[in-house]
Amino acid sequence: MYETAEGPYTAPERKVGLVHRVIVPDKDYPKEYAILVTDRRSIFIRQKKTRGSFVLRGEMRYGTALVTDVQPKTLEDYEQTTLESLAADASNIAVSHNAVISLVMTKGEPKFRLREFFVWLTMRRQGHKFHVYDLEMNYRDGVKQEMKLQFYIVPLGAYFKPRRQTQTRETILREYAVDALQIFQKVLPDRVISW
């Protein structure tokens, strides 16, 4: 619902875009989400568990899918489900765009441990840097308490693998992160977003 000089009007909520996959860190088990972005809110839709905690933590660390068998969902996959039912699902997270205080994208390089020697060696031989992109969204929840949601922008293998034939790992990860950020730029004020 919104108001103009002529009075209140109700316009249907419009779907703007879909970020196919992000990973939200958790001390017990990282969680995979797709983000359905509308003109009013972002709905983090919990995805089925497809990998073990060790693999997901590795994907967060390297910024890329280690397993390539999962197909991304599309906006059409969510056509039969109402936005209200997605937002009401306890496993999902709905954040109103009016409540967003800031959205900050950062880029970092993974810190390697001894047991990841072969990953480090592979990266070094390829001559590419792994940059991990993550977003931190600060917002106010329903009781006006400030909340923070950090999520890593990690493409699925179905996105990554075909592009790897012609692009560097660094380019693919940057483009995926920028595409996700551009979806948010369509719906959030410029003062909220920083990179």
Image (tube, grey):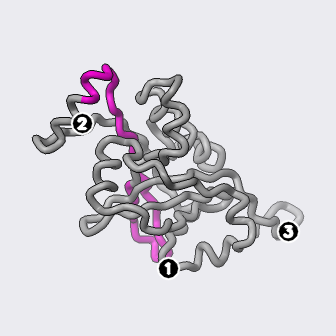
Q: Quadrant of the C terminus?
A: top left
Magenta segment boundaries in residue numbering: 122-150
Name the disc covering residue 7, or none. Answer: 3
- Is residue 97 visible from the viewing direction of this image? no
Left or right: where 107 falls relative to 72? left
Name the residue rendered at 24%, 36% in the picture: 119
Residue at x 20% of width, y 36% of height = 118
Decide which of 193, 20 is in the foreground and name it.
20
Check disc 2 and report its element: helix, strand or loop. helix
Q: Amino acid at mark 2?
A: Val
The answer to whether 54 is drawn above or below residue 192 in the figure is below
Q: Residue furthest front?
A: 69
Mark 2 or 1: the one toward you: 2
Can you tell which of label 3 and label 1 is closer to the viewer?
1
Query: Of helix, strand and loop, which one carries label 3?
Result: strand
Which residue corresponds to mark 1?
Answer: 90
Residue type, label 1: Ala
CB under 8 Å between callouts 3 and 1? no
The residue where tag 2 is placed is 119
Q: Tell me if residue 6 is in the magenta stretch.
A: no
Q: Position of residue 164 (x, y in %)?
A: 48, 30
C-alpha separation, residue under disc 2 versus residue under disc 1: 37 Å
* Residue 192: image location, x then y, percent: 51, 46
Mark found first going from the N terminus, 3 or 2: 3
Q: Residues within 10 Å of mark 2 (few under 14, many from 20)?
A: few
Name the element at disc 1. loop
User: Is 119 positioned to the left or the right of 76 in the image?
Assistant: left
Q: Position of residue 83 (x, y in %)?
A: 68, 71
